[in-house]
Amino acid sequence: QVQLQESGPGLVKPSETLSLTCTVSGGSISTYYWSWIRQPPGKGLEWIGYIYYSGSTKYNPSLQSRVTGSLDTSKNQFSLKLSSVTAADTAVYYCARLNYYDGSGGTGYYMDVWGKGTTVTVSS
Amino acid sequence: SNELTQPPSVSVSPGQTASITCSGDKLGDKYACWYQQKPGQSPVLVIYQDSERPSGIPERFSGSNSGNTATLTISGTQTMDEADYYCQAWDSSTVVFGTGTKVTVL
């Protein structure tokens, strides 16, 4: 079955750019949407953004000015860059497959496969 | 508004029914889903499309959505169901999570 694995540095300095990669195994990245989510220590889930296999993206308005997503179909990977990080960006970062269902009431989106998460700490 | 509000905590005795609400503007006009997250683990999808269960999710998990409120119901709650639960919806092409509810089984 499809599995996702996040990778990237666990420590990033303030004002620098956080870069994470999610590797998809057991299936092709060339379908579905692919999403990033984060969870600060002791807090709830925050959606960061998603990228479609075509390359189109959508980001959380609160992070839009600092986020860039990309994908590499040859490596079956998608990536996240978050610039100008501060301590508030310290969190567990997850990647997930964003699946969808077309019903009579419209289309519903849900994340049915998640990575194990990677902890990123912003500190000097 | 695209905010989804959940009660911070719900307590339930083993074997009883737990209901977790998720409130948002005209949420019933959208599809809602629910995730379970245990400490130190990734979230797991337990309900999608308001009331559909993914393969492997026990039948004691059910969902509904109407008006401004989506509800996750756990019937015959077990100690293994103790976890945080998050609702999620799709609004204006963005993902919106609920504030989260800690379910305590005691």
Image: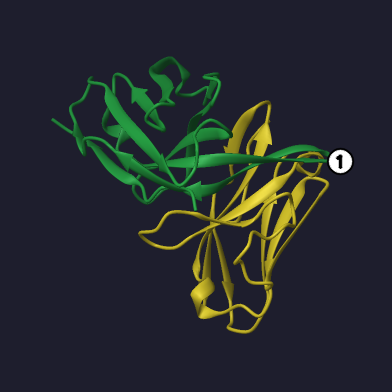
Q: Quadrant of residue A69?
A: top left
Say above or below: A25 vs B43.
above
Say above or below: A65 vs A5.
above
Which residue in the structure is indicated by mark 1?
A104
Label 1: state its secondary structure. loop
Label 1: how many Cα within 10 Å (few below 14, some 14–19, many 20+): few
Question: What percent of the width, then of the height, locates residue A104?
Answer: 86, 41
Question: What percent of the width, then of the height, locates residue A35?
Answer: 49, 35
- In the picture, which quadrant includes the C terminus of chain A? top left
Residue that appears at 75% across and 42% down:
B27
Q: Which chain is yellow in the rendering?
A: B
- Would residue B76 be found to the left or right of residue A39 on screen? right
- What shade does chain A have? green
Q: Nearer the viewer, residue B68 or A83?
A: A83
How many numbered discs sit on the rendered protein? Answer: 1
Residue that appears at 36% across and 44% down:
A5
Residue that appears at 22% across and 20% down:
A16
Q: Amino acid at mark 1?
A: Ser
Say above or below: B86 vs A63.
below
Q: Quadrant of residue A108?
A: top right
